[in-house]
Amino acid sequence: MRIREKESFMSLKLYNSLTRTLEGFKPVEAGKARVYVCGPTVYGHSHLGHAKSYVSFDVLIRYLRYLGYDVTYVQNITDVGHLTDDADEGEDKLDVAARREKKHPLAIADFYTESYFQDMDRLNNLRPDICPRATGHIVEQIELVKTLIEKGFAYESGGSVYFDISKFAEYGKLSGRKVDEMMAGARVEVSQEKKNPADFAVWKKAEANHIMQWPSPWGMGYPGWHLECTVMSMKYLGDAVDIHGGGLENQFPHHECEIAQAEAATGRQFVRYWIHNNMVTVDGQKMGKSLGNFILLKEVFAGSHQKLSRAYDPLAVRQLVLNSHYRSPLDFSDASLHGAQSGYDRIKQAVTALRDKLKKAPSGEADKKVQERIEQFRGKFEEAMNDDLNTSVALSVIFDMVRYANDLLGRKDTSRQSLEKLNEIFTALGGDVLGIVQEEYAQVGGGGVDEQLLDGLVGILIDMRAKARADKDFATADAVRDKLGELGIVLEDSPEGTKWKKV
């Protein structure tokens, strides 16, 4: 990865949800960036909403390293304590999944953690430097609860411990909500254990049937979801975190409660920059597991969801995310994915052709005009990324580079050194930062599968089958369908035509 000069440090601007302004990035310690991103609650497979969030923060990490920062990236795994209403009511999501699948909650957590990382690897997301689990930090969480009680910010009631928001004057500063409004808006059937309806649990008393529970000074119980992230971020990044990221839906109550716990315990600012990504929508509605309209990443990769006409390359999904700004909603459709796939294929084809030409191009000095053009691309790319990670504009620069590469490849006198410079900038900007350009591409016949070629070949067979049916040659039509079925490709006929999917 090409490291930028240290003067570039001051040029990155990020939208800080805490101040609601675009701010120059100034970490606690010069040259270092401590970043915490709320990881998944591992009770099911990852969906497109996870892709939007974690690709967005992956690009942040990549760009910070490109600028030369020494980054420590922490992303947790929530494997206990996240209740079904995201606050203090409902059941633990891991317990619900454990009953559904008739397995122990930790077996559920292990299985879906592995599934999560498989999907993130396919999206070309970098692995976090540290990936702590909530269940591995129970001792530290109990200690923080003790501190909050000792300092008068929390109280025990009925075996649970609650944070008293009336004692923390700045509660609501991240979300912009006022405590009085939260009190008035609290649900009628509020727990009688709380002093204030909006107080939140930092430790929950476990019912007898709750499988995951631990001994504490207040009886058998388990940590609150908000407490977990506070403890794990401070354990690995210290009392002052440079950047804390997560989905916009977690701004309240999750992140608001994190701030209250940390700052009540330490007396200092918890996070300098709060970064929130927007959501994925399907037909204009938020996508999520609780709403039942989610699309799993595995379904996208296999083309097995009813809303999809084909299988899509994982990096086409990544490109779809990068087409939108991280703070803007991303409305999903099969058409949008198809466009992203076409764009990804164009980049892949240009880079592959460039690297093939490198092997046989004449040697010679790199053309000064080529070098100047490359620096122009770099400047425009960095300008876009420095403007609150504007990946859609940065991606447009990559397509400008594709057009320029195709032009150079059409010239007989382009030197190998000029092509090497262009390949380097594709690798640095499109690969190291955006994660779209790969070091190597799988070759058809060499173990890899070109999805565009596969789509074309299946399309030819579908057309042949349609002609056979039109000619009333049903034996041939059935044979085409059956042979494809043996290969794991299912045809689905509808009034709009025939679609296929891999199973």
Image: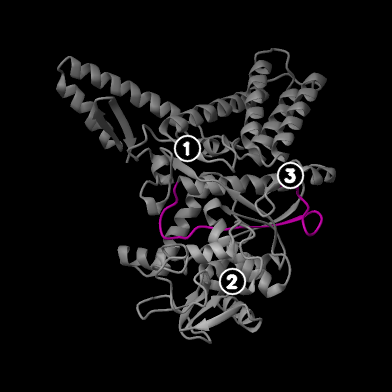
Q: Amino acid at mark 1?
A: Asp
**The C terminus - image quarter:** top left
Q: Amino acid at mark 3?
A: Lys
Q: Earlier in the sequence, mark 1 or mark 2?
A: 2
**What residue sits right under mark 2 in the picture?**
165
Q: Position of residue 281 (x, y in %)?
A: 45, 42
Quarter of the figure that contains the N terminus: top right
Using the numbered discs, state the Cα–Cα distance from disc 1 to disc 2 in whole angstroms: 36 Å
Q: Which residue is mark 3?
A: 13
Q: Is residue 117 above or below residue 310?
A: below
Residue 499 in magenta?
no
Q: Earlier in the sequence, mark 1 or mark 3?
A: 3
Mark 2 or 3, which is nearer the eye? Answer: 2
Can residue 42 be found in the magenta stretch? yes
User: Which residue is at a point 73% across and 40% down the rendered structure image?
Assistant: 386
Using the rendered view, name the quadrant where residue 390 is placed. Answer: top right
Q: Position of residue 487 (x, y in %)?
A: 30, 36
Of the residues shown, which amino acid type is indicated by label 2? Answer: Ile
Query: Under tag 2, what secondary structure?
Result: helix
Name the foreground residue: 490 vs 419. 490
Task: Choose between 256 and 182: the one closer to the eye.
Answer: 182
Q: Is residue 401 visible?
A: yes
Residue 150 vs residue 167, the one in the foreground: 167
Q: Is residue 9 left or right of residue 295?
A: right
Query: Mark 3 or mark 2, which is nearer the start of the sequence?
Result: 3
Q: Locate residue 150, reporting x and y percent.
A: 64, 84
Name the residue carrying label 1: 331
Q: Which residues are magenta?
A: 22-47
Q: Is residue 372 above or below residue 39?
A: above
* SS at circle 3: strand
